[in-house]
Image (cartoon, rainbow, N blue to C red):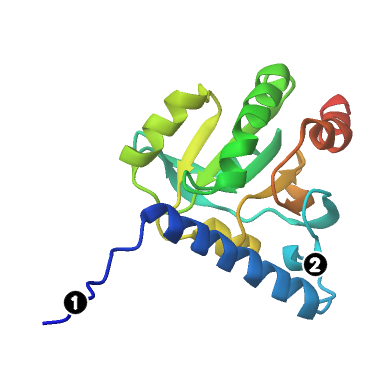
Amino acid sequence: MSKHRKRPIPIALLAVGAGLLLLGIVAFGALSGADKGNGEADLVRVGFGAPAQVSFPAPDLRLTDLQGAPVSLSDYRDRVVLINNWATWCLPCEAEMPTLQAYYQAHQHQNFALIAIDVGEPVADILPFKERYGLTFEIWLDPNLLAIAAFRNSGLPSTYVVDSAGTVRYAWAGAVSHETLEKYVTPMLED
């Protein structure tokens, strides 16, 4: 019998490791990504914090909301939509939630929708998070990571702005700031 027992790895350490792995993947992509030349989002080249101007049709995502009802991005074709891919375990995602909620509250009556698409977590994990931050914008479930695949980005958080015609106009990775939202999204609401 060995004197040394293996200690279990704390969950927090695993979460930090997963986050660092995601950052490493995005950084590797940023250093090695080549321009695809087809106008589609390539967030590995976008960088963190500042959005890149893009122009490609929004994917027709068909997911479910927290109540299990079917939802579709195409139902929002007449509005400016901010899509945010996130997870409750993602620290930058958590940090940006108060900013997203404040922006949504200030602009929800301006033909604007904010849809937070959770990457594969159960409703039981999302509901306490939603309550803690008082989130009133829509939260969709994506158990099969369809949004991540459609936008070709595995980093979290990642954000996209879709205009009222259904074209993705901005894309960026990393936590969203109030200043960035006001600079890039608000002018689209005033058109």
Quadrant (top left/top right/bottom left/bottom right) for the C terminus: top right
Q: Which mark sits nearer the N-terminus, 1 or 2?
A: 1
C-beta proximity under 8 Å, tags 1 and 2: no
Residue 164 is drawn in which quadrant?
top right
What amino acid type should be assigned to the residue bearing mark 1?
Lys
Query: Which residue type does callout 2 highlight?
Result: Arg
Q: According to the image, label 1 marks what residue?
A: 3
Using residue 98 as the reference point, say whether residue 170 is left or right of it.
Answer: right
Q: Which numbered dot is residue 45?
A: 2
- Give the spatial CA distance, label 1 vs label 2: 50 Å
For image coordinates 62% across by 26% down, the residue present is 101
Q: Is residue 182 above or below residue 50?
A: above
Residue, x 62% and y 27% (percent of image)? 98
Task: Report the front residue among 102 and 70.
Answer: 102
**Displayed quadrant of residue 123:** top left
Q: Please, what secondary structure does the residue beneath circle 1 have?
A: loop
Left or right: 25, with 143 as reference point: right
* Residue most extreme to the left: 1
Say above or below: 159 vs 33. Answer: above
Q: Nearer the viewer, residue 65 or 7?
A: 7
Q: Nearer the viewer, mark 1 or mark 2?
A: 1
Q: Residue at x 77, y 54 (%)?
A: 48
> Residue 70: x, y in percent?
41, 42
